[in-house]
Image: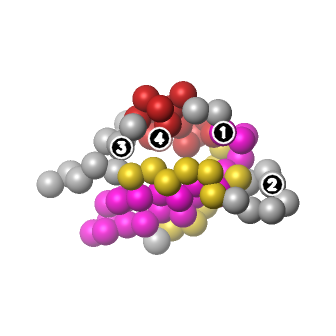
Amino acid sequence: MELYLTTIRRYKKYLLKQRIIDKAEILTMSLPRFMWIISILYKNQPIVDYVYDGTSVYVRRLKCIKYLCSD
């Protein structure tokens, strides 16, 4: 598991290179400038990212991003 703070621009650039479910919808959705990402890994490969608003006083989950299996 990884936890990190990132910008929307950097995160969408990263997602553009990944195999994820609903890629077009996720890349075009409006998100805050800063986000906390909790990335769940299996064998050092991401399987799901939980995206949280990094600008809000009250933390709330914005999106659950699921990766496609690389097998």
Chain part drawn in magenta? 31-52
When the figure is inspected, residue 40 is found, relative to residue 51, above or below; the finding is below
The residue carrying pointer 2 sits among few (fewer than 14), some (14 to 19) or many (20 or more) residues within 10 Å by Cα, namely few
Which residue occupies 70% across, 53% down?
A: 53
Q: Amino acid at mark 2?
A: Ser
Q: Which residue is mark 1?
A: 31
Q: Which residue is mark 2?
A: 56
The earlier-in-sequence mark between 2 and 3 is 3
Secondary element at tag 1? loop
C-alpha gap between disc 1 and disc 4: 15 Å
Quadrant in which the C terminus appears: bottom left
Mark 1 or 2 closer to N-term?
1
Q: Is residue 5 visible?
A: no
Q: Which residue is mark 3?
A: 20
Q: Earlier in the sequence, mark 3 or mark 4?
A: 4
| Residue that appears at 71% across and 41% down | 32
Which badge, 1 or 4, is on the more N-terminal residue?
A: 4
- Residue 29 screen position, x and y as percent: 58, 32
Q: Residue furthest right?
A: 57
Residue at 81% from the left image edge and 54% from the top image edge? 56
The mark tally for this picture is 4
Query: In front: mark 4 or mark 2?
Result: 2
Q: Are marks 1 and 4 in contact (CB under 8 Å)?
A: no
Give the distance between the C-alpha atoms of the residues marked 3 and 4, in whole angstroms.
11 Å
